[in-house]
Amino acid sequence: MKPSAFEEKNEAAWRELEQAIEALDRGKRVADAARVPRLFRQVCGDLALAQHRMYGRRLCERLNVLVIGAYQHLGMAARRGSGALVQFFASTFPRAVRTEKRVVWLCMALFFVPFIAFIAAAYFEPKWIFALLPPEAQAQMDAMYGQDTMDDYVREQFGSSFAMFGFYIINNISIHFRIFASGVLLGAGAVYGLGYQGIFLGAMFGYVHTSGNLHRLYTFAASHSSFELLGFILGAAAGVRIGLALVHPGRLPRAVAMREAGKRALPVLLGSTMMLVGAAAIEGFWSGSGVAAWMKHTAGILGWVLFAVYFIFAGRRTADET
Amino acid sequence: MAEPKLDTLQSIELAEGVQILLRPAGPLPRAWALGVDMLLVGVFFLAEFLVMLFLSNTIGFFTGIGTWLLLVFVTYWGYFILYEVLRRGQTPGKKMMGLRVVRTSGERVGWGASFLRNLVRFGDMMPLLPQWQFWVLAVGFYLFGVTSCLVTRRFQRLGDLVADTVVVYAREEFLDGVAKLRETVTPCAPPMVLTREEQQAFIQFSERASSWSDSRKEEMVEPLAPLLGVRGRECVVRALAVGMWLRDS
């Protein structure tokens, strides 16, 4: 059969599938959806024939595009609804974190060792803190957590809880995404990012320990601390997991190891991002609000305890589902 | 390792028993697409700012600022992800350049893959322009991304490797010179029996002939001279004629 005759014979079917794909691309419904799989199989046959009979590039390319388009629409994963979200937080996320527990512990150490060291420095060697914090940062800490700061200084700075929430989202989650992404560069970026955060947060806290109003600082920071710090650390762990796949791919080729690491890191990254959204909401609407200090402290301690329980026990019984 | 290939085409066999071909796109068209997308993101920022400036009279200045910050954040990180997932792998920039993101298996990208490849973009764009590290609005030289593109078989940047995706041409543009050839060349049968690969070579030569200069064509058919019994310009015409005959029969 000549290519022109082949084209003529099948033109109607190809045209129909092309129109269906175009409609689906624009998010419209196709009138007779049941015909699409049938047309797809037919065009698959046509493409195979055209390739075998060497009908030329123009024809083969047209059918190639057609088959890919139909394949991509037919191969779409079904929408899983709200059950998927519940399952994610009930088991997928905590299980993924446990699978990566060695990396998570490493990242915990990377953050908490300098953080605690600098707070301790307030009592033993305060000059370390003064060497690290530039004078402007010291002035700002004085303004926020000094001995004689107004009660709602932070709120005054931002004008409203909502503006604060917006600022925390954009600032914190951007840092979070960056620490994750730079972890991909052999893990070095995440190590640097976490260490940097640990050192500077430690220095800032340490500074308040030397000369500020500790009560105000911890009352403000307590409630969202677990969400925010654990969120950062888990995001960094996800990045380090991928970076390590490049350094130490095990028995896999590096490209394959990276792909596998991406699959393992994705739930950790998604979950930790949600934790940071939670942290921003708490920080914007609750931490700066006039709620009694003891309630904020209790909420803070409760947060750490609940997260510990959650990551250790959640989803242990559920069978592996994917 | 299979024998080295002449082209970058990736062939994938589907469950339907047919092979599809993907042609990965190199760094340059992708850079253009990215430029267009970044421009559009900037336009979105500006539009959102103007709307919020207008609305801040009624909802309050600080609420307006907060909302704008949220919108900027969502736009910056969401632009690529939403377009890639909802528009079958095409952001406006990619669409303009005729590109599409697909999984290496040929399937469309989903939320997870798109999320991963676009977050890792930040790693790809290192080192950053020093003045441009303000909050989310980072702009970088894409040193890692380009290097990774150049050393991988499918031109994948790090984000593509992690998410198992590849950027391909949505459809191949090429000049089909055969229609023009018909006026000047009459098809004729090959002088001997040819294998499939040889037939393929003749057909592709006739299809792509219009994109080469005359001297290049003559150079290419040089080894055929003893077989076809003619040389130079004549030999080119004979080779084209054989290609057309094979294609049409």
Image (tube, coloured by chain):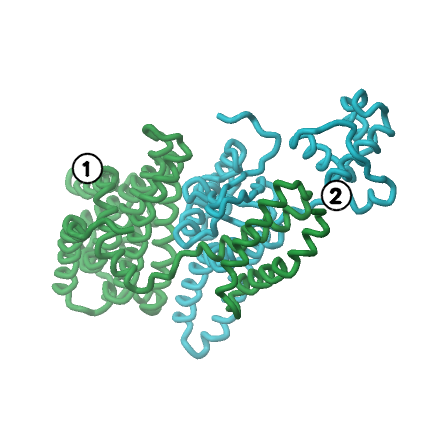
Q: Nearer the viewer, residue B179 or A262?
A: B179
Name the amino acid type tagged 2: Asp
Q: Nearer the viewer, residue B144 or B246?
A: B246
Image point 39% across, 41% down: which residue? A182
Whether discs 2 and 1 lie on one chain: the answer is: no
Residue assigned mark 1: A125
In the image, taking residue A174 as reference, residue B229 lies left or right, namely right
Residue assigned mark 2: B248
Q: Residue furthest top?
A: B226
In the image, taking residue A217 as reference, residue A174 lies left or right, namely right
Chain A drawn in what color? green
Q: Is residue A310 above or below residue B154?
A: below
Q: Nearer the viewer, residue B85 or A20?
A: A20
Q: Quadrant of residue A85?
A: bottom left
Image point 53% across, 70% down: which residue? A31
Residue B93 location in percent, x, y?
58, 53
Q: Is residue B37 above or below residue A26?
A: above
